[in-house]
Amino acid sequence: MSKAYLLWGLVWVSALCQAQSPVELIDTEAGAESQADASAPTLPTEPRQVLEALRQRVNALGLSEEPVPVEGSRTPEGDLFELGKQLFFSRSLSEQRDVACASCHHPLLGGGDGLSLPVGVDAVEPQLIGPGRVHNGYRAQDPLADGGPNVPRNSPTTFNLHVYQRRLFWDGRVEVTDYHHDGDGQSAAIRTPDSLRNLPDPQAGHDLAAAQALFPLASANEMFGREAGKVLSNQDKRRLLERRLQGSGPEDENPWLPLFQAAFEDPRKSPEQVVTMERVGLAQAHYQRSQVFLDNPWFRFVDGDDDAISEDARLGALLFYTPLSEGGYGCNQCHAGRRFTDESFHNLAVPQFGRGKDRHGFDLGRMLESSHPDDRYAFRTPSLLNVAVTGPWGHTGAFLSLSQAIRHHMDVETSVLAYDYSLQSNPQFKGIPTDRERYRNRSLEALEQARAGDSWQYLSHRRFDPVHAQYLEAFLETLTDPCTTDPECLARWLPDADDDGPDGERLYARTGSFVGQPVTFQPALPSPAQSQARVEPEPMRESWFVDATVATGLDYSLPVVGNGDEQHRVSGGIAVGDYDGDGWDDLFISHSVLPGKLYRNQGDGTFEETTELAIGTLRSQQFGALFFDYDQNGHRDLLLVEDNRHDDFLRVYQNQGDGFFLPDPFKAGIGFNRFTHSLSAGDFDRDGRIDLYAAHWGFTAGADNSGYLWRNKGEGQFVDASDLLPPTRESPQTGKLGLVFTAVFTDLNNNGWPDLLLAGDFLTSQVLINDSGSGFVDRTETVISDENGMGMAVGDYDNDGDFDWFVTSIWNPLEQKAYVGGASGNRLYRNDGQGRFGDVTDEAGVRHGFWGWGACFADFNNDGWLDIFHTNGMTSKNVANEAIFAQFIHDPSLLYINNGDGTFTEQALEVGLNHTRQGRGVSCFDYDRDGKVDIFISHSGEPVTVFRNVAPTDHHYLTVRLRGGPTNLDGIGAKVHVRSGQLSQVREIRLGSNYLSNDPLVAHFGLGESKQVDELRIVWPDGTEQRVGALEVDQYLVVEKPGPL
């Protein structure tokens, strides 16, 4: 064995000892007295009493009966072990060949790297590991390079990996979803980052560690790099590496083949059959599972040896296992059993720094995987086995000493407030410019979230004597297997000193020091606009649209927050409705990751915020909303679709009729058991009361079919009528899951009964025909082929008297497709009048829409033909992988102008619609009553954008608002027909969704050059017809339903 190996343990310990604590902690007796809680129960301190009390605790908890956790471990010997070891130290698993698994998880560094945050690819010295390993800082290669580490979370130890039976990684993104027996013993269904949300990954196999081992290989910052192939899917990246190991190059012989043949007892000669990525994972899993270090003093004590640990350690153990209410710290509530982990997720407000996971530098922890706000900043409980040798500690490696980590648990507030966010007391960051304010603000937000979380009750909150930290540290040191600090003992997990690896790509790791490490910070690169000479723009023709966000008073600001998880990234909407009864449509704007805002239309082209006045302080987050008179008293109430499972994902505010709302604690009987997106209202049973449909988009396997259709029973109460719906359309990718983004009630076959159109993800869009109010029949035909139906618009674009269907989806203009989803774009389905659709997408020219969301049909130039507007955008939850979504990050919103012959021409830029933000919801309506339809676009976590229509046209218009009976104030479901000259048009009054948004309950008609409306015909929901002739143009007309004769 190399002499260098013998010195590594001392080098690592020395490097950490040079580091000063980033937190100033009080160690004086006076400080102890001031922070101790005199009212707390006291524990025994006399050695014999401590021993007896500890024995009682051990027995009461059943620790002496619990076996040593060896299940799932492997032996460090044999051909499979040797193959795993070679792979673990091979740079061939890095696309750039500059890093190996051992670069960040070395046995001589506690199974980690001794750094707060790791440096993966592009290190200044690739062979250097641990202290002194520095990223090269090249911004041209890595736009986020800042001289600091390029991996956002601390390297977890590989020691005793086998004790984790359900979840791996800090956020549990590789986890067992279900155990089942397949004849060969217990196997697992495993969810991974390659899964569709929380469904099992069919490529993951049944070994948790093997599934985990393959993901660092595909990570841009950890091992894969940013060279060729960076936009490939994880699976395709692994295929590149697989072909490398298979020797698909010019070599006549494959050096890896004999090792795989021996390890898997496979005599076949073909590398393509024997050397596979699945086997790479299995071999690495065997190697990592063999790092079993359980021969520790504490286990010997538990098994009956009273002298195995010191008196201080016994006191520490007693504090560890005694509940807070009895004078201890109850640490075992999370660090449970002999595995010392509950594998659950807790927010301990560990200081936040480094790159973070999203574009704004946030790391939301488990919430990135679950989307539940309760999991914000929560991370998996690490096992404490060998914890003394696996520092730095915390998901950011914020604590450089074990004592500091312990004291953080004892007094989280002091730790967070006193932390050195300049990081200059952390030698890894010495001399590197850091964003101190951002780190502090992120940490304070995590602290605020922790205070409101369930885990807060498990913490002591200043009820401690600082000496207790010394006792606890003494106890935790007894969890150390002496082999972990003995290079000779660890030698079996290291390659021989003269072993170059099968293909000569072995990592010859060496350690360095923080002293003298290079500073690679570089100033930010100039943007392309700064580096080029200013070019005067060409004169534009007169614009149709101008950005009126400021002019309308909607130019508010929002704090920057993390929105990396998928449920929140895809959300954010606009509800439109006249809540105060003044005849002007108001707004509720949802921001997804922040509380929404209520705005009142002042009737002069501006809006004023009335959230606090009309609703009160709103602290919850909304995906979308709907103004809906659910109690039929003539006042539009407000339904908020939210992210909080404890509130049934819904909040209902009852309109008091005076401009104020009060919460309905019973929520009209409505509640959901999963995330909900768009809401749509319609009288499906024609009883005069408006019912509700809730679209659910989620990936909960086995979820029931409830909570979709809600029948209005009257008196403000609803009952779940989802049993009247046919089964969810089965997806070839996801099976029978509810993946509906958007729903609309509309009469497709002109029989007077509202049907249902559902835009669903992964080929689950459906056409449901109303069976005379007794239920719905699935009439979805194969022509309904939108791959990822998201938003929709329904309208008679060809003026043939029936309602057609436009669905936004994903169009990928590039050959590479690394995301999970379709690539064939939008769909336009033409109705034949009987509720049967034909696909006219290409004929109409509306396929190429990028990553589409909200959409609307509206006549923007008042020529009598409905145009289409839709917004776009998508990002990754992990900023390191945004190359995959690069083509969608700045997608423009699109405007398809109807040519009147069944075709459309995209003209957004030509008419001044220059919108490239991350659009989600859309509402198209004439907010200022100038006769031209304007556009409102919502975003996830950002303010709304308003485009005012100022089209230079002499075309005329007519806008019609209905006044129905007491149970259907707005005439929802009515059809409004207009005939002017040779042009006949129809609109339907719908309280539906454009995707988390809605248009107002009016019928707007462009009339072209016609100077008179020859006939206005209204077919009310009960079949009553009303006709008005010879109307003047350019007016906003309110029509009341005629009463009985």
Image (cartoon, rainbow, N blue to C red):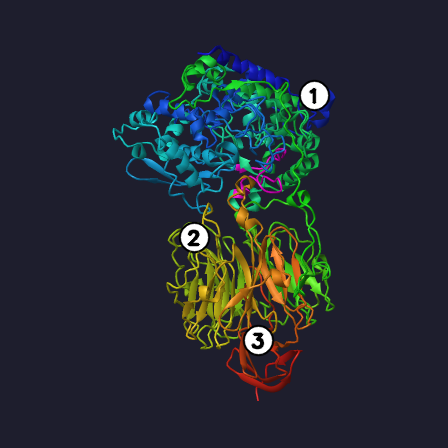
Task: Where is residue 971? Give x, y as percent.
Answer: 57, 75
Q: Is tag 2's residue or tag 3's residue first in the polypeptide sequence?
A: 2
Q: Nearer the viewer, residue 591 or 675?
A: 591
Task: Tell me if residue 444 is in the magenta stretch.
Answer: no
Q: Quarter holding the C terminus?
A: bottom right
- 3 vs 1, front mark: 3
| Residue on which disc 1 sits | 27
Q: Residues within 10 Å of mark 1 (few under 14, many from 20)?
A: few
Residue depicted at 48% across the width and 70% down the height: 804
Q: Is residue 459 left or right of residue 604?
A: left
Magenta extent: 345-368
Q: What amino acid type is highlighted by mark number 1?
A: Asp
Q: Is residue 1015 left or right of residue 425?
A: left
Inter-mark Cα distance, 1 to 2: 54 Å
Inter-mark Cα distance, 2 to 3: 45 Å
Image mark for residue 407: none
Q: Is tag 3's residue or tag 1's residue first in the polypeptide sequence?
A: 1
Task: Where is residue 209? Give x, y as percent.
Answer: 41, 32
Label 3–label 1 contact, CB within 8 A = no
| Disc 1 element | loop
- 1 vs 2, front mark: 2
| Disc 3 element | loop
Q: From what the image shows, is residue 686 above or below residue 1031?
A: above
| Residue on which disc 3 sits | 864
Residue 470, visible in the rendered structure: yes
Residue depicted at 50% across the width and 12% down the height: 4
Inter-mark Cα distance, 3 to 1: 79 Å
| Residue on which disc 2 sits | 703
- 2 vs 3, front mark: 3
Task: Where is residue 68? Give x, y as percent.
Answer: 42, 24
Q: What amino acid type is highlighted by mark number 3?
A: Gly
Q: What amino acid type is highlighted by mark number 2?
A: Ala
